[in-house]
Image (cartoon, coloured by chain):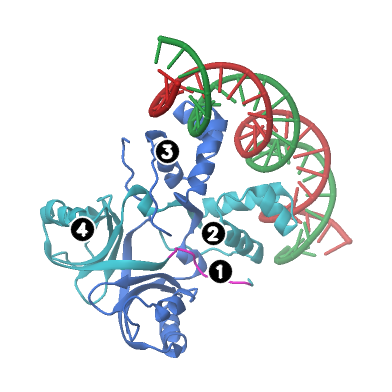
Chain colours: A blue, B cyan, C green, D red
Amino acid sequence: MSKIEVSLDHIDYQILRIMQNNARTNNADIARELGMAPSAILERVKKLEQKEVIVQYNAKINPSALDQNLLSFIFIKTSDIIGEQGVAYLLAEIPEVQEVHDIAGDDGYLIKVRTNDAAGLVDLMRNTLGKIEGILSTRTTIVLQTVKEEQKLVIPSKD
Amino acid sequence: MSKIEVSLDHIDYQILRIMQNNARTNNADIARELGMAPSAILERVKKLEQKEVIVQYNAKINPSALDQNLLSFIFIKTSDIIGEQGVAYLLAEIPEVQEVHDIAGDDGYLIKVRTNDAAGLVDLMRNTLGKIEGILSTRTTIVLQTVKEEQKLVIPSKD
DNA sequence: TTCTGATATAGAATATAATTCATTTTAAGA
DNA sequence: TCTTAAAATGAATTATATTCTATATCAGAA
């Protein structure tokens, strides 16, 4: 997701606000809500996609429906040189790893991992992380309960 | 998002896989891909929503398009009693706070925060977090670069 | 002011898709 | 085998997406 410089007007913001809340809202409904023609909405949405303002449409699935009940954050110290991110890319390839962040001050990464349970986490650390060259140490934080988990951005109310 | 016990078959898994990758895939396309009638897909998708397997449809927006270029994780120690989460709910109400997790071992929370820049973070900490009773201390980790950020779950390939 | 070009929108026409519903199929139990 | 419930199909209807052309809007140049 590259840094982009785009100019969005308040109609774009309204579209983003609607889409962020329900990505399956159809153009006709958006058009009705904003008092515009569906074709105009279609054009704007396509443009937002094309400018990579809208990156993706996700269905958020309840982890417990797939029996994925353990969420963990792991700090990982590596031998990666600053600016290089060899280990990071390896981490990013692991399906259970949802996020990989290069963090300041620790010569390392913070990753977010979802597994079935504690056994699954141990297994992942031993058999997957354990096989990655360049990991010097890890520190794991277990999530007991998630109170909020969204990726909604704050959208300006005016231009 | 409550814990749920549901029985999903491999067709449900396939639908979830498709929806997770593109929540705007229409029923007709899913039907074509799975070799079924659109009406059958419609029924299943509605059932998945109703059973709260699919929780929400999100549009993922590029943060930099909204000039939100700083991501931070903050560990927060509080005077919350175990089991009670007064501070957590206050944190969850802050729009810039995307996630609030109750974590093990630290009498505290881990939150994920998105602001325009460092000044925005300082402002948030001073004027918003600073006003919350019960916060004992904070430790902030700044994200320099995000290598991966998804919420896709690992979906079983068989029942 | 008047023209020009670029951009955005509306609105009509057509293509696709969603939705409903009656019928059929399937699978498990009696 | 019969019964029942759940799920799927396929046809019919309604709604939406998409395309296209004509207008409208606006900024800058003559």
Type of amino acid at the residue the image marks with label 2: Gln
Circle 2 is placed at which residue position? B20
Q: Chain of mark 1?
A: B
Disc 2 packing (10 Å; few <14; some 14–19; many ≥20): many
Quadrant of image for the C terminus of chain A: top left
**Marks 3 and 4 on same chain:** no
Circle 4 is placed at which residue position? B118
Q: Main secondary structure of the magenta part?
A: loop
Based on the picture, tell me whether residue B154 belongs to the magenta stretch. yes
At numbered mark 1, what does the secondary structure look like: helix, strand or loop? loop
Disc 1 packing (10 Å; few <14; some 14–19; many ≥20): some
Task: Tell me, for residue B155, which label it has, or none.
Answer: 1
Measured as percent of width and height from the top left, residue B150 is found at: 44, 63
Kindly report the distance in space between the C-alpha atoms of the residues bearing marks 2 and 3: 24 Å
Confirm or deny contact between disc 2 and disc 3 (CB under 8 A). no
Measured as percent of width and height from the top left, residue B31 is found at: 70, 53
**Residue located 50% across and 38% down the image:** A44
Q: Nearer the viewer, mark 4 or mark 1?
A: 4
Circle 3 is placed at which residue position? A12
